[in-house]
Image (tube, grey):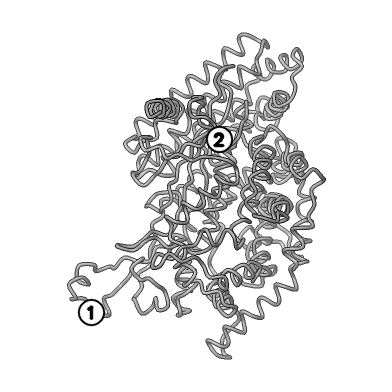
Amino acid sequence: LIKRSLANNKKMNESRRHHIPSAFVSDIGASDIESVTNEIKSNYTRALEKIENEGGSNAFMKFSRALGEASEASAQVTLPSMTHADASTRAASTIAKDKLKCMFDGTFSRKALYEALLVDASQNDLIGSDKRASLHLLNQFRRVGGCALNSDNDRHALAEKQKKIEVLCSEFIQALNEDTTCLTLREEELEGVAPLDQFPLIHQEEAQKGEASPESLLRKVSIKSPYVMPVLQFAKSPITRKAVAEASAKKCQEKNTALFLKTIGLRHECAALLGYESHAHYMLETKMASTPERAEPFLRDLLSRMRGQLEKDLAALNKLKIEEEGTHAKGVQAWDVAYYIRKYKASLGVDEAALRQYFPLDHVKNEILSIYQELLGLIFTRVYDAQVWHPEVQCYAVSEAGKDSGDDQPPLGFFYLDLFPRDGKYAHQCVYPLRPSYQKDPNHRVTPACANIGNLSRGTEGKPSLLRFREVETFFHEFGHVMHCVLSQSKHSVQAWAWSAVPWPGGVEQDFLEVPSMMLENFVWQPEILRRLSKRPEDGSSLPDAMIEVLSKSRNVMEGYCRSRYLAMSLYDLQVHGGPGPYTYDGKLLDAAALYDALLTDLSGVSVIPGTFPVASWYHPMMGYDAGYFGYIWSEAFAADLFSEFEAQEKSIIDSSLGNKYKETILSPCAMIDGETMLRNFLSREPSLDAFLKRICA
């Protein structure tokens, strides 16, 4: 038995080693990236030329394989732009991503390839996911390559504008990732914020020797999110909060404002060349929402429903501000919101600082992995010998539970956890695709892989990392994306899990992209799950029932303000991409910056900080969510409908049979089926907004 067990383990290890992604290493350099990029481009071009020369015979399948192989090879040269320690390597990786994006986009301007695919489509009666993938790719020749345009000059102009857009977006993102802006604040200016040692001392040696005067106890406060939020939530000094909020709102403003404005102008020009009314119309054509005329009323209806709650929220925040600062205090400002929302929740019994003591990262991580394994019938196995790009990164293989290890079945996929902030690293939270699922040949399907790139709070010397509850919620949400990626069973890479962070084409409709992870995010608010996720290091205790009850009830607290602000940003995204500007609002003609100020001030009730343009540090419109930011709440609405099925379970919300149905009908198909069909397949009925409206209007 022991010998057989060892033999089976050896076979599984060999199987994992055979299928695990490679070449994700820390010592890759700029020259390596350039040479590999050139090789990818050369191999891909040869494959396309061969298809063109051979004509229409089986052209679609050959093209799909070429796309898959080029996509699979790309991540090794694009991932370093998000994670590498060396600035020159990150810069080279950003250039590589731009080149590969132009390569993939350029595919769809190759008329000989387009004609070969049309011939193949006319000769072969494709069905199922093959037909869907073929139609999607042919549509891309029209949408991306302009193959329906009669003029060669127009096609050339379109391609040049698209290249410029890609470079502008990359420069925008790189500026944010490279930004290391810090403020220097005295310890007394940080009164209320704990622990202070999350902010490095400026004069570290003198402080350790006891030689530093109180005036010289200065702390360096980064304006990256894990450090900004504790200050905005807890700093008693409004002057301190204003300084940090203003610095955050001005992040990269000098450079990125111009990049953003140039980009939206070029996007409109491309849409006009292709015959669309606007870039928003172009982008929504392939989404569930289909048109801005359908998306905007959806957002405005929600704004109307939230208006009464918004007014109540602002009144409550203003009352708290007057109580603390006196009757002379002006209305709630942008730098006050997080502070007084935290105080309002505290008045209801939600103590953010006390909550944090129950969420040590290691325990939260282990429990999140455990919950997902139970719900979806999976096994996650740590792969210790995997190639990784930083010592903190962990790799896991994902397999079906209950499978006999002797079957030598390859894992379903792989995921990597890269959870902490570093200088130069992508400064937000995301799941980055590393490899698409696709059929390389009849006997070999390439399994998917991705990286969860996080920026969670680090522990300090001798103390564990303790997460804010919002970070716990975000981790749970992002891991939903991980599962969507690694469980996809797509035959064609264009139907595998992907989004615009990578250069290759793929993924579900963008306004469906968040549905699976938002459904799973709902779990984190359930008492059953909160008890499992929480464990105070001092005594191992879980959150007390009283704290769980208060926290669960607080979910919709300040929803009026928070949702109104989000909806205002979503409308801005649609409107700024709705034409070249100036933009008409409330009877006035406004430029892009003034439009943002007007929308946010009017619809959220809180003014934008004067002299700031927060769009300059807003990742989404420059990272593929252009005219698509509304997709979060669109997805949330349908996610609530899906979650209502789990809520209805009597014994436990972690219902493995329902979880398996969710895996088979929502996660595994990925883009092989359209979003609305997947919803119907899981629900066994038409999708409804009732569960969502009931929750937000409660």
Q: Report the amino acid beneath label 1.
A: Ser
Quarter of the picture holding the C terminus: bottom right
Q: Which residue is mark 2?
A: 402
Q: Residue furthest right?
A: 686
**Label 1 SS:** loop
Name the amino acid, label 2: Gly
Q: Quadrant of the N terminus?
A: top left
Quadrant position of residue 215:
bottom left
Q: Quick check: 177 above or below 12?
A: below
**Residue sitting nearer the eye, 224 or 576:** 224
Query: Circles 2 and 1: CB distance less than 8 Å?
Result: no
Tell me which residue sits at (63%, 52%) in the image: 518
> In screen coordinates, is 576 left or right of 221?
right
Would residue 570 appear left or right of 320 to someone viewing this image? right
Which residue occupies the extreme bottom position in the image?
327
Residue 357 spot, x, y in % from top left: 44, 68
SS of the residue at dot 2?
A: loop
Q: Residue furthest front?
A: 1
Per the rendering, the mark at residue 508 is none
Q: For the residue carrying disc 1, how many other residues have a C-alpha within 10 Å: few (<14), some (14-19), or many (20+)? A: few
Using the image, determine if residue 221 lies above or below residue 76: below
| Nearest to the observer: residue 507 or residue 327 | 507
In this rendering, the label closer to the viewer, 2 or 1:
2
Q: Is residue 689 visible?
A: yes
Residue placed under numbered mark 1 in the picture: 213
